[in-house]
Amino acid sequence: MILLKELLKLLILSFLIWFFYKDSKRIFKGFFLHLERKLLVVHSLKLSIVLILIYKFREFIFLYEILLLFIFLLLLFFLSLLTLKQVEFNIKGTINSKYKTFRYGSKLVQYILFLLSLLMNLRELGRHKNEVKEKSKKAMYVAIFPVQKYIMVSLTGLEFTKRKTKFIKEDELMEIGNQLEPGDILLKRNDWQATNLGISGFWTHTGLYIGNLQILDEYFSEVKSLEGIKFSDKLKELNIKNYISLQNKTCLLVIEAIEEGVTVKPLNNIAKVDYFSAMRPRISKEDKLNAILKAFSFVGLPYDYYLDLESNDAFICTSLIYKSYENSISFEVERKLGKKIVLPNSVVKKFARERELQKRELDFILFYDLDLKTRKAYKSTELEFAKSYKRNISYYRKLDMLRYLSTILDIK
């Protein structure tokens, strides 16, 4: 009779191990085939809860150590697979933004294992209080990432206006193109755009002006590090794909990070807007060359919906500028909801703070502002540009609000 009970316990234990193994196998297969992040989250949490329950009720569970070890190993297996996959995709240089899932999944499982190790020994909890707080913040961002991405994608392109044209017209676009040099930092804003609600400050987007291969060849013709070759030859040597995509293009171009990722777009894409400005880094052509080549190395990488400034495999518009110029310009890094970020507005704030200094890092090139009387953009002053980052709801209250609100509609 005793032998029968022991056999029954072993049978139950074997069944539980088989069940978790089979369930995990299904999850692994589904996760890696379909890249469904929720499978990782749900299954990891489920295993974690079971692991805690087994430990807390270990006195009543036969051979609980075996079951405990097995489930703990499953969680470790998750972590190992995710980390290996992340490394593999980084080595291959994938441009698929979905693969960032592995990075976030890895962080989540690390956090779960960290908490479990503390729960197993509650006396250690007090010593690791600050660490738990910091890791909890990171885990929170991992958890809300899908929602954050959904909101950002949904708002992209949505406008609260029936106005079809922008304030900057074709004649201004020609003048803008004539004043720019490779390496210039461009900023833009469109009024009544849904994405403005989620971006702190007046300016909402940045880009890096490059011109075209002919302009780049001429501009960097005397840079010593090129050792007598053209910029286009250097680009061809470093990135044949980028060279091929640019060799037949004669229009003016910008490197920018938008919804489709880091890409090369015509100047009109960032300049045919409501408000536009340009600043020029006060650095050598050598440094500009390095910055532009670095920006080209990011082309093709996905947009960073996680907003991780330290990421090198996905970018938002400002992190593209920040990473390209990180060895020659110091940008202001802010913290928003616990995240490090460089905002388009903070780039203008930096200029305003340094503009009268001899060692300033940025020079003013141009600023197109709104003339409410004509409902068109006009070329404004450096002083107005320096104050533009302060614009908020109080600034608009001082305007002729009826005229400003009329810009929602396509009327004169």
Image (spheres, grey):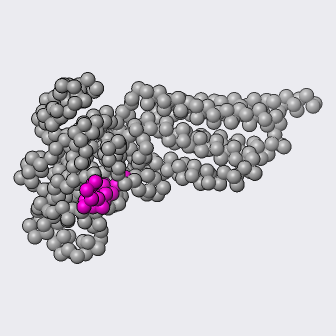
Residue sticking out furthest to the front = 358
Task: Give percent across and percent down for residue 221.
Answer: 15, 32
Residue 267 in which image quadrant: top left
Task: Say if residue 49 shows up in the picture.
Answer: no
Residue 355 within the segment the image draws in magenta = yes
The residue depicted at 75 percent of the width and 51 percent of the height is: 123
* Residue occupying the point 66% across, 51% down: 128
Say which residue appears at 24% left-offset and 41% top-offset.
284
Among all residues in the image, which is located at the extreme left? 171
Residue 230 vertical placement versus 254 (above, below): above
Query: Of 409 and 295, which appears nearest the observer?
Result: 295
Which residue is more in the foreground, 142 or 39?
Answer: 142
Image spot of residue 86 (x, y percent): 48, 32
Q: Nearer the viewer, residue 212 or 84?
A: 212
**Which residue appears at 51% of the width and 34% of the height?**
31
The boundaries of the magenta stretch are 342-360
Residue 353: x percent and y percent?
A: 30, 61
Whether residue 87 can be seen here? yes
Which of the image's four quarters has the C terminus?
bottom left
Residue 195 vs 67, above or below: the answer is below
Count up the numbered dots.
Answer: 0
Question: On the rendered structure, is 362 left or right of 54?
Answer: left
Task: Say whether residue 10 is left or right of residue 131.
Answer: right
Quadrant that contains the N terminus:
top right
- Where is residue 288, by image quadrant? top left
Determine which quarter of the picture holds residue 3: top right
- In the rendered view, tell whether residue 175 sits above or below residue 355: above
Taking the image as shown, residue 52 lies to the left or right of residue 398, namely: right
Q: Position of residue 374 (x, y in %)?
A: 8, 67
387 to 351, vertically: above or below: below
